[in-house]
Image (spheres, coloured by chain):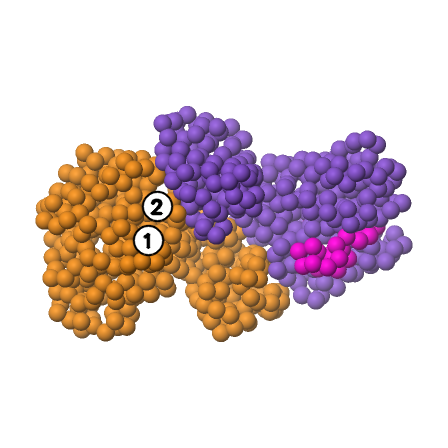
Chain colours: A purple, B orange
Amino acid sequence: MGVAAAQGFRAAGVTAGLKASGKPDVAVVINDGPRSDAAGVFTGNRVVAAPVRWCRQLLGDGSTGGVTGGELTAVVLNSGGANACTGPDGFADTVCTAEHLGAALGVPAERIAVASTGLIGERLPMDRLLPGVSAAVTAATADGGADAATAIMTTDTVAKTAALTVGGWTVGGMAKGAGMLAPGLATMLVVLTTDAEIGSGDLDVALREATRTTFDRLDSDGAMSTNDTVLVLANGASGVRPDPAQFTGVLTRVCADLARQLLADAEGATKEIAIEVRHAVTEEQAVTVGRAVARNNLVKTAFFGQDPNWGRILAAVGALPVEQAQFDADQVDVAINDAWICRAGAASDVDRTAVDLSGRQVSVTIDLHAGTETATVLTNDLSHAYVHENSAYST
Amino acid sequence: MGVAAAQGFRAAGVTAGLKASGKPDVAVVINDGPRSDAAGVFTGNRVVAAPVRWCRQLLGDGSTGGVTGGELTAVVLNSGGANACTGPDGFADTVCTAEHLGAALGVPAERIAVASTGLIGERLPMDRLLPGVSAAVTAATADGGADAATAIMTTDTVAKTAALTVGGWTVGGMAKGAGMLAPGLATMLVVLTTDAEIGSGDLDVALREATRTTFDRLDSDGAMSTNDTVLVLANGASGVRPDPAQFTGVLTRVCADLARQLLADAEGATKEIAIEVRHAVTEEQAVTVGRAVARNNLVKTAFFGQDPNWGRILAAVGALPVEQAQFDADQVDVAINDAWICRAGAASDVDRTAVDLSGRQVSVTIDLHAGTETATVLTNDLSHAYVHENSAYST
């Protein structure tokens, strides 16, 4: 299941002792071929963890131009430490981890991707990590997807896996991330696998399109992590070579499934809020407006309080400079759970008591009346539990 | 004292019945001359409350070009309602309020500034507001500064006033604002007065310079209000015409005093955090970096938890795109309360236990090693009380 659902993949999750809790903390995903096409997208943060630097060396990074896509035989992931802001020694630890798994699988270190998650600024205990990697290789099976997804959890309360089979080929995947969801995929690790036959160039294009409209539109708290990584591996084991557009569609559906699971498990959230922005001049402006609302603490606390405070939504939209979003503030309509309580920038004749915010799912609709484009951004409320979890995380 | 400390000013605060609590909610500040020079700065939000639209008509707004500065005889302020997102009827209410006070003082409505604060989206009860304005005019005295400052409070826990006398002339002022402190002076009302003789053009320049380095560098939660207003009135009653640079310096000191009071009273805060950014390429870039840290919820919750989590600070800095701040992430140093726990983008040999975060005052120092410019941004932590106050505000 999950990341090992497609033919020719094995996975495992084991306990190496990186976490004080004694829970599983090392995962591997192994591609048995025949092909080893791969692609990745990474955090946009300029402070990048050692494993992200390593993966970019292997696969390139579309955001900086140059080659994207490459070949991967396996991915090793750990929770219990981000290996970020650890200097040259931390980077050496990442390379050492890749070399260790490469040796076990008989491939060069350059065929091994590495991903880490946890506290920033501390070295990984290599004396525990490397034996854990060896144990994970031994344990890896086609049934190991759930264990792998469990081993990458940090503050997640549930493991996140997904898989979809169409026309004889499968896309599967796993994700972790329960907070810091933000553009650029903050503190999110995702590994996707497929037994479709698709070259690394097409794979890279498909991955960027799939993440652009799914993970990239999750914005839980506006923070952006140093470690965000989304990898996709394709081995062609099904013998089917799908049309690239169809492949992109299926990959997007799996990513959307995982993204919804991330939203549902965001740290301390009591609401899942979908902010749809209509009639923007461009799709990018629609996303910008949605993000501005998603990141506004006054809006987020209002939803925690089940208060349909549309004035805060309008104020969040209005705070954007004209060059980022073109609209006339006196034209903007706002609905909460389909009750249009604000029309043309002012209270409508719909009373705020018409809005029922008792449920977990909330929809916000903002009509800018400025253009033809639409986008939806997903976020959570800001709750006491969010403050509690994030004030207590490293201590 | 406060806003009536300078010669030739009177003030009052009365209870008109706008607040359900029965606390004072209408204030006036009256300038008895001989001169009536004035200037104002207002929110940068594109969703602007009716009183802000009115004041901009009177005084202009430097942000949109055109005339700035003008003449004012009085200011009327109310808490208990923002008069924002209330449409043309709400604007008519503001004009009516100005006409009412103008008639009482024997001047045109165009000599009366209006400021409002409270919930967005609801009309003001004019049948209570206008009698309150009349009562405030009757009550206004040179001793009324404290009452006026009390009447503009919303979630503020203390009234905020300041005054400074130098060389025979005085600058006084009052402020309200206990949350939503943000660039563009969010949900902050400030009235400053002086008996110095200074023309409206010089007054406008002085006010913009004074607010730029004080109120504009408060960033409590990144939200920006629809109602932010800072007004300054000068009557020349002292007979002293100070050098404009000296006047700007004194005005800035009064603004800095009020800004510190706002920070100290920010909603639910347990920490006052000064973020100094050193060696930026430009002052604007230093401010941008400081704001990015000030607005990051993960940083803010860490300080609430008394956790010197410098990795989150570095990640917040790194999330800025290159075009907004030039620096090499591998060169950045970070100190918390003067303990340099991060050097060159990685953990230094100073242990995090060296940082004592038990006190209310916190200093963060970020050295970008990129240029020569410095700026300091002030903010608060993100606490349970912030979530509580802001989730319960309108309900």
The residue shown at (66%, 56%) is A63
The residue shown at (82%, 52%) is A71
The correct choice, above or below, for A333 with respect to B353 in the image is above
The correct choice, above or below, for A213 with respect to B348 in the image is above
Residue B48 got which mark?
Answer: 2
The region drawn magenta spans A53-80
Describe the element under mark 1 as helix, strand or loop.
Answer: strand
Is A290 situated left or right of B219 in this image?
right
Is B131 situated left or right of A211 in this image?
left
Where residue B292 sits: x, y (%)?
50, 57
Residue A70 is a magenta residue:
yes
Residue B166 is a magenta residue:
no
Residue B338 got which mark?
Answer: none
Q: Residue tagged by mark 1?
A: B42
Label 1: how many residues lie within 10 Å, few (<14), some (14-19) or many (20+)? many
Is B29 situated left or right of A393 in this image?
left
Going by the numbered disc 1, the residue's amino acid type is Phe
Task: Quadrant for residue A94, please give it.
Answer: bottom right
Q: Quadrant of the N terminus of chain A?
A: top right
Can see residue A284? yes
Where residue A220 sits: x, y (%)?
55, 43
Is B86 situated left or right of B281 in this image?
left
